[in-house]
Image (tube, rainbow, N blue to C red):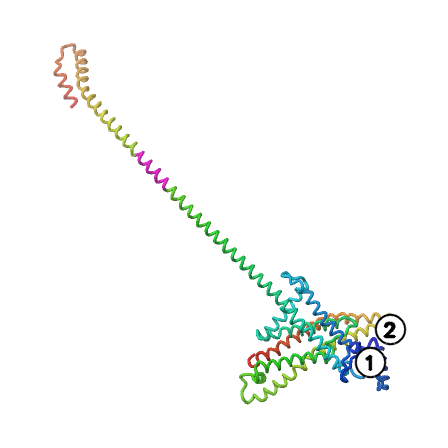
Amino acid sequence: MANDPIHQFHINRIVPIEIGGLDFSFTNSAAFMVATAALAGGFLYLATAKRAVVPSRSQSVAEMAYDFIRNMLTDAAGKGGMRFFPLVFSLFLFVLTANLIGMFPYFFTVTSQLIVTVALALLVIGTVVVYGFMAHGLGFLKLFVPSGVPGLLVPLIVLIEVISFLSRPISLSIRLFANMLAGHITLKVFAGFVTSMSALGAVGVAGALLPLLMVVAITALEFLVAFLQAYVFAVLTCMYLNDAVHPGGH
Amino acid sequence: MFITPGYAQEAETHLDATHAETNAAHEGAPAVFPPFDSTFYPSQILWLVITFGLFYLFMKRVIMPRLGGIIEDRERRIASDLETANRMRAESDAAVAAYERDLAEARAKANAIGQEARDAAKASAEAERKRVEAGLDARLSEAQSRIDQLKASAMGEVGSIATETADAILRRLSARDIDRAAVEAAVATSRG
């Protein structure tokens, strides 16, 4: 059981709750969601508590995150995108913190649950669609008709644009989910090699060195992936929000 | 794929679990891959909505105004400091300009005073020189007139001295009485 690479994704009920036939139990997944929000929120709260003009290290980190997301959003969606600043900032920090918490051994990775990433992706796309129609009415549909396309090609282009728009929430959610899932499975499998080979005696211990090195290297890679996927999620969110702010022109 | 003993064992328990499919107590080994197990979808969505919703509100209401305020404060502080620095530099530039202007004025004044003093000194020296020269000229012409006078009187006496000398010489040489008038005539002739 200990070597099962899938075991880490199991969900266990901590406080069983059932409402109207649906299972709303407080699970280990929910616990780590709470931990993610509490850790990220608590860190930012403490880091910015002093409001120092000359920032401490933790305040610098908080300010860096703020500037980082602000630049990302203004680069992608311009000044009009700033209304979504809290959303993108929260998404980035939530995903990043969840990914990083998942890097601790025996910890649960919230973002390796498909339903979580799907929900976050639908939140982004839902925001794009709702705000797009609210701000531009039917003009939002210009999104599917790029300007300067010859009349004959318009139906084909519209078809392609619609398909690409519909595939966005899928790619946005699957990318994050699959990266976290695959990374953790790979880590677990190589770590499993180390334990099972070293159980074979001296030769096995020597042979276990290679997977051990792999585990170390993959751990480093996974830290990179944890940050990179949060970044990619935030960047794509900014680009999709740009469509809601400026549906016609790019 | 490399199947670890632990994984193989897991597969066996998995098989056992499928035999007892109706048994609800198989939390350790569900029939489907956990991320695709829809049993916990409602629970995960609910808790995600709660946690992410609170996190979003906390960010929007507390953290982001705070961070924005900190960064804005710093920018304002830097801008005001820069402004103060610029103002002080302008002030010091003005002070330097005023100092240089005063210095130039003072120098010009000093030059003027010097020039005046030099002119006055030159004028007085010139006057003195003229006075002295005038005095010298007067004495020179006085001396000249005395010289002329002396010369004229001396020249007047030269004739009588020559006559007497010639008379005396002739008396001694010839030892006879010499006509004085003749000697005088001879002297006058030789003097031309």
**What is the residue that sits farthest to the right in this orientation?**
A201
The answer to whether residue B125 is magenta is yes
Residue identified by numbered label 1:
B27
How far from the left and from the top, in percent, is residue B83? Answer: 53, 59
Which element is circle 1 on? loop
Residue A13 in the image: above or below residue B22:
above
- Which quadrant does the N terminus of chain A fall into? bottom right
Residue identified by numbered label 2:
A200
Give the CA distance from mark 1 to mark 2.
31 Å
Residue in the image at 86% along x and 86% along y: B20
Which amino acid, by three-letter code, is at mark 1? Glu
Q: In the rendered structure, are the residues bearing label 1 and label 2 in contact, judged by CB atoms less than 8 Å apart?
A: no
Foreground of the two, B165 or B72: B72
How far from the left and from the top, in percent, is residue B130? Answer: 29, 34
| Residue B37 visible at all | no
How far from the left and from the top, in percent, is residue A84? Answer: 62, 75
Residue B102 in the image: above or below residue B183:
below
Residue in the image at 61% along x and 65% along y: B71
Find residue A134 and report its image quarter.
bottom right
Residue A210 in the image: above or below residue A154:
above
Residue B169 in the image: above or below residue B107:
above
Which amino acid, by three-letter code, is at mark 2? Leu
Q: Which residues are magenta?
A: B116-129
Foreground of the two, A85 or A219: A85
Find residue A220 and report its image quarter.
bottom right
